[in-house]
Image (cartoon, rainbow, N blue to C red):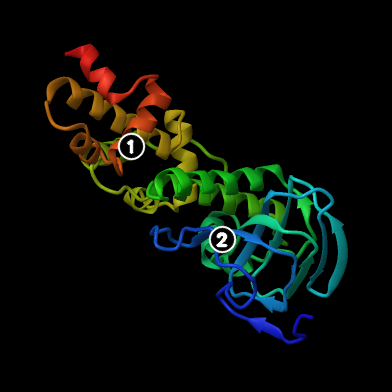
Amino acid sequence: MADSRTIRTDNLAPILPSVPLLSSVGAGWQGITLEQFRCPPFETPEYSYPDHKIAIHTRIPEDLRVKRRLNGRVQVEQVIAEQVIVVPAGVTHQVQWDQSSEFLILTLKPDVLGQVAHEAIAPDQVDLVPDLPRVDSLLRQLGLALLSELEMNGGRDHLYVESLQNCLAVHLLKTYSAVPPRFPPAGPLPPSSLALVTGYIQDHLDQTLPLADLAALVGLSACYFASLFKQSTGTSPHQFIVQCRLQRSQHLLKRSDAAIADIAIQCGFSSQSHLTRLFRKHLGTTPKIYRLSVK
């Protein structure tokens, strides 16, 4: 039987019976954490966190039933695949499930929402409404995309993670906020601002390019900058940088005899396998085969 006391903690360890199968802790992500769990039937104590928590089921046994108490409301649920639960910071939560289950826990720090809400809501008015589970396909897909990045690349593509984090934060504000956001209309960046950013990207392809740093070049928040950049170029900052890095790698593969692993690092990829995966995805071949074809 669960302890009736409410546990206030920033750590899942006192709450869940199993350690994570996979975790982004140590991957250098800022403001967001992803953990994957596989847990036996269990009843948690009642708890609350200082951060927002999102639970996403990844493997659901047949007829999985959950009894949940969220902010004093009790419900017994038949879990379905697209269902997610958003537990805002400071809200009490208790859950009991009757079969082994696999799920993701996304943790988002409240100041991430405050930063994204800068142009739409006063940061001190950001307030997510506690709600029982609902079908939210977009939120689930964002969580699975973060999981895929963690599995395939160790979570090292920080710009991609930042992009997903911004999409996640905007969606939470639009869908779960007590105060509906009113984002200003997105228009193109001024030509001088766009030239400044794209020039900076080309000059620093071998380095980490945080979205917040690119936005700071033109005095915007990361989320609003990403929207204006896409209006200006037709692509997101992350996609634009990937294309620039691939173009640089093609040039070096043609003109240089350097090892492919060294070229990957020179172009800002985390490893040769990271370069190869994106090279195959976007160009339909591998760096090795491409080099042989152009020599």
Task: Say if residue 225 shows up in the picture.
Answer: no
156 or 260: nearer the viewer: 260
Kind of residue at disc 2: Leu
Q: Quadrant of residue 253?
A: top left
Residue drawn 65% across the image and 48% down it = 139
Residue drawn 57% across the image and 74% down it = 13
Residue drawn 55% across the image and 67% down it = 19
Residue 125 percent coordinates (x, y): 63, 67
What crowding class fits label 1: few (fewer than 14 Cα within 10 Å), some (14-19), or many (20 or more)? Answer: some
Is 21 positioned to the left or the right of 77 in the image? Answer: left
Task: Say if residue 130 shows up in the picture.
Answer: yes
Kind of residue at disc 1: Ser
Q: Which mark is residue 113?
A: 2
**Tag 1 secondary structure:** helix
Is 187 positioned to the left or the right of 78 in the image? Answer: left
Residue drawn 39% across the image and 46% down it = 157
Q: Quadrant of residue 169?
A: bottom right
What crowding class fits label 2: few (fewer than 14 Cα within 10 Å), some (14-19), or many (20 or more)? Answer: many
Q: Which residue is mark 1?
A: 273
Q: Which mark is residue 6?
A: none
